[in-house]
Image (cartoon, grey):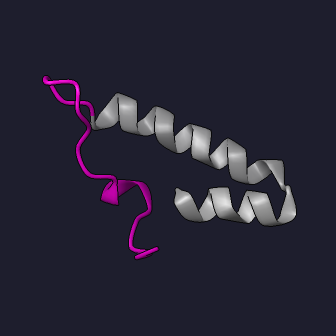
Amino acid sequence: MKELIVAYQKDGDNNHLIAVKKALKDIKKYHGQVQGMYGVDEPLHGSNPI
């Protein structure tokens, strides 16, 4: 997600922000844990390592 934020700062493309907001929403929905922390985000990006 950091890469998208840096890309937004560089080129100002709002699609980068939209992707970050969706990723954060997905993390809250699918990776929330009982103690209020979040699990890992690997499933969000598929087989792409970055």
Residue 17 locus on image (x, y percent): 70, 46
Q: What residue do we see at 48% from left, 38% from top?
A: 24
Q: Is residue 14 above or below residue 30?
A: below
Q: What residue do we see at 77% from left, 50% from top?
A: 15
Quarter location, residue 43: bottom left
Q: Is residue 31 left or right of residue 11?
A: left
Residue 36 sits inside the magenta stretch: yes
Quarter location, residue 3: bottom right
Q: Is residue 9 left or right of residue 37?
A: right
Q: Which residues are magenta?
A: 32-50
Residue 47 locus on image (x, y percent): 39, 73
User: Which is nearer the eye, 23 or 4?
Assistant: 4
Q: What residue do we see at 65% from left, 56% from top?
A: 5
User: What is the total number of numbered labels drawn onto the structure image?
Assistant: 0
Q: Which secondary structure type mostly characterizes the magenta part of the structure?
A: loop
Q: Is residue 13 above or below residue 17?
A: below
